[in-house]
């Protein structure tokens, strides 16, 4: 953005005081660069929206800005940027306003194209369908990109495009011959550009006073440091340029409704760090009130804004927590699950006070839940030597309330990624992680066990490239992981996953008793009784002494009976509405026990029913413990 002028060393020596160096010189092999800075020295003057200068006092030349002649009807001029006569414009009807479309704007036009002899080759007018394209992006011929850029809204003109600005030596057979100069009668209806930030006319980015090479825009929860000044708009003839708010610096978080006025946050989320922009804002009738919060109840204003500091704040813990970097780390790498880490941290109540927990140079392996879930997530997102300030919700820590933590990742050794391992290393890693999962399962840490089984599986699940003897090992490991995963899922009452893992185990080893039993358990809970019964019967065919399977079969049959009664009520009600076409069968006699309680007969199939099962209490107890 600085004014940079280049010249050879000899030219600089002969230039009196180096003041007469031309702005554009042919570069030589030995080049000296002179940088000049100019602008107002007073801070308030730098913030004046109408001073034509950005905050900071550096003048930035807009190389894309081109001055076009204001032509009257039947007047003609060269409107090519190179001024080489490549495209000329003759005005047929003047447009209105002072604005012209800019690069990237989507313009809407009607056109009729002819050869120099008057032969028409194309017309959107004849089709009754206006043409849209993005200006200056090469979506149309060069003559259009440069010619339409010179037009105002409502203007109608003839653009004459030389071959180099049209279809060149190739032409566009069969309608346009090679090396043809073309004439287009163009009417510009409208355009839609990036200047209207929200498409409602309430926040117009009138000019970028200082550009920035930064990446990323402020988002929800991000902290920003902003300098802004507000003046009466140019359209206010009586008070144009009058100061409404002097140059002011503020710090606030996006999304916290903490900006001094509503339009400021709307502008900031469209800017990059280091940018300075002039926005024209106004309250939109029935829409967003951009000027709400400004003094004197102003309805429109010119606002100059600089985004001085953009501090990203990452959402963590399912969006209920936050992480803000206070000291940037080294490089770009982050720890992964299994990394050996060294951290220091201080945990305090959210509203301040004495430390709840403190660790200095604490060594641990990431992913084993040695730290709280929230702290581990923070470390996963850090770089070496980084310090971050975090808010961790109660559900993600072990302190019983939402807390603030200042964490430094002193060092870490990343675990080798699976893609960089050979097959032997993958098998060893799977066994190691499975063992950690087993320990977690025995300790009742089911969530950690499930994570470890899944991670171990990722090392060996796709073993097509393994040697035959290695595949025998991976098959055994995978079977164990599927069975263990199903066992964890049953304890977590995740019945669908239990069915999935059990099925994978059965695919690996047909008829596996544990897999049959666990899939039957889960299917029964899902009320998929036919599937459950099929698995239990297959299991009992293998081992008719399997007590747990017998008890489960009774539970399944009881579920089938209950489901049949539900179905009978549903379908019986449907049949009764058919005018007695179908009659309910006589209900069996209901008997009472010695205590006077009603006992319903139990269907045992084959048309028989009985009122009690021997040792029923023991059977029911066994089923409930499955």
Image (cartoon, rainbow, N blue to C red):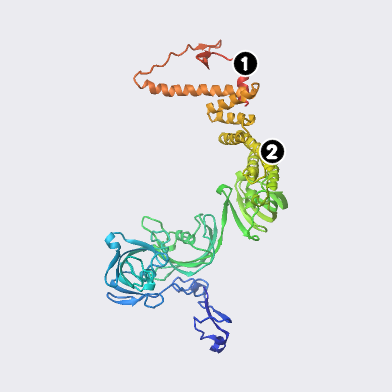
Quote the CA–CA distance across marks 1 and 2: 37 Å
> In the drawing, what numbered circle is on residue 482?
none
Q: Residue furthest top?
A: 594
Residue picked out by circle 1: 615
- Residue 202 falls left or right of residue 271: left
Which residue corresponds to mark 2? 438
Residue 615: quadrant of the picture:
top right
Indicate the position of residue 161 as horizontal and vertical percent values: 35, 72
Of the numbered discs 1 and 2, the one sitting upstream in the chain is 2
| Vertical side of 492 occupied by 99: above or below | below
Residue 585 picture location, percent across and down: 42, 15
Residue 399 visible in this rendered orientation of the protein = no
**Secondary element at tag 2:** helix
Kind of element beneath mark 1? loop
Q: Residues within 10 Å of mark 2 (few under 14, many from 20)?
A: many
Can see residue 620? yes
């Amino acid at each position: 953005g600085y004014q940079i002028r280049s010249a050879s060393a000899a030219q600089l020596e002969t230039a009196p005081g180096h003041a007469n160096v031309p702005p554009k010189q042919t570069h030589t092999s030995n080049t000296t660069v002179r940088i000049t800075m100019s602008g107002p020295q007073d801070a308030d003057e730098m913030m004046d929206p109408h001073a034509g200068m950005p905050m900071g006092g550096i003048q930035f030349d807009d190389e894309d800005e081109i001055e076009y002649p204001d032509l009257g009807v039947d007047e003609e001029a060269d409107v090519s940027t190179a001024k080489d006569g490549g495209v000329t414009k003759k005005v047929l009807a003047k447009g209105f306003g002072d604005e012209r479309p800019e690069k990237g704007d989507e313009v809407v036009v009607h056109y009729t194209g002819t050869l120099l002899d008057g032969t028409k080759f194309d017309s959107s007018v004849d089709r009754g369908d206006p043409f849209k394209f993005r200006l200056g992006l090469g979506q149309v011929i060069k003559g259009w990109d440069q010619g339409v850029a010179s037009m105002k809204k409502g203007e109608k003109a003839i653009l004459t495009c030389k071959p180099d600005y049209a279809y060149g030596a190739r032409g566009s057979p069969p309608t346009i011959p090679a090396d043809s100069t073309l004439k287009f009668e163009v009417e510009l209806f409208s355009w839609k550009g990036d200047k209207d930030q929200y498409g409602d006319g309430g926040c117009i980015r009138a000019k970028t006073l200082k550009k920035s090479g930064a990446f990323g825009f402020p988002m929800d929860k991000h902290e920003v440091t902003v300098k802004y000044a507000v003046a009466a708009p140019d359209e206010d003839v009586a008070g144009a340029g009058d100061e409404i708010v002097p140059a002011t610096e503020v710090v606030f978080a996006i999304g916290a409704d903490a900006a001094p006025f509503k339009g400021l946050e709307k502008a900031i989320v469209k800017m990059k760090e280091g940018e300075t922009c002039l926005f024209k804002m106004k309250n939109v009738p029935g829409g967003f009130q951009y000027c709400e919060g400004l003094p004197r109840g102003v309805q429109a204003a010119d606002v100059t804004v600089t985004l001085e500091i953009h501090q990203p704040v990452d959402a963590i813990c399912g969006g209920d927590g936050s992480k803000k970097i206070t000291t940037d780390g080294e490089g770009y790498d982050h720890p992964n699950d299994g990394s050996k880490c060294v951290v220091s941290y201080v945990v305090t109540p959210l509203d301040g006070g004495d430390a709840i927990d403190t660790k200095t140079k604490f060594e641990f392996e990431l992913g084993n839940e040695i730290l709280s879930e929230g702290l581990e997530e923070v470390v996963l997102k850090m770089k070496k030597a980084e310090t971050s300030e975090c808010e961790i919700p109660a559900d993600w820590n072990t302190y019983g309330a939402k807390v603030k933590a200042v964490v430094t990742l002193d060092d870490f050794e990343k675990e080798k990624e699976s893609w960089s391992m050979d097959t032997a290393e993958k098998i060893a890693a799977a066994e190691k992680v499975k063992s950690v999962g087993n320990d977690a399962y025995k300790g009742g840490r089911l969530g950690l066990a499930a994570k470890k089984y899944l991670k171990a599986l990722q090392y060996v699940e796709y073993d097509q490239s393994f040697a035959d003897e290695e595949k025998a090992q991976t098959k055994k490991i995978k079977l164990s992981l599927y069975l263990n995963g199903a066992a964890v899922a049953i304890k977590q009452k995740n019945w669908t996953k239990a069915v999935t893992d059990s099925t994978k185990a059965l695919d690996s080893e047909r008829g596996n008793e544990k897999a049959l039993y666990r899939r039957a358990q889960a299917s029964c809970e899902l009320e998929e009784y036919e599937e459950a019964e099929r698995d239990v019967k297959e299991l009992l065919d293998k081992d008719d002494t399997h007590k747990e399977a017998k008890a489960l079969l009774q539970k399944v049959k009881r579920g089938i009976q209950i489901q049949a009664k539900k179905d009978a009520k549903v379908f019986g009600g449907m049949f009764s509405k058919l005018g007695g076409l179908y009659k309910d069968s006589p209900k069996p006699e209901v008997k009472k026990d010695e205590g006077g309680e009603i006992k319903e007969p139990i269907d045992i199939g084959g048309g028989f029913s009985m009122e009690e099962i021997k040792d029923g209490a023991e059977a029911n107890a066994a089923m409930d413990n499955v």
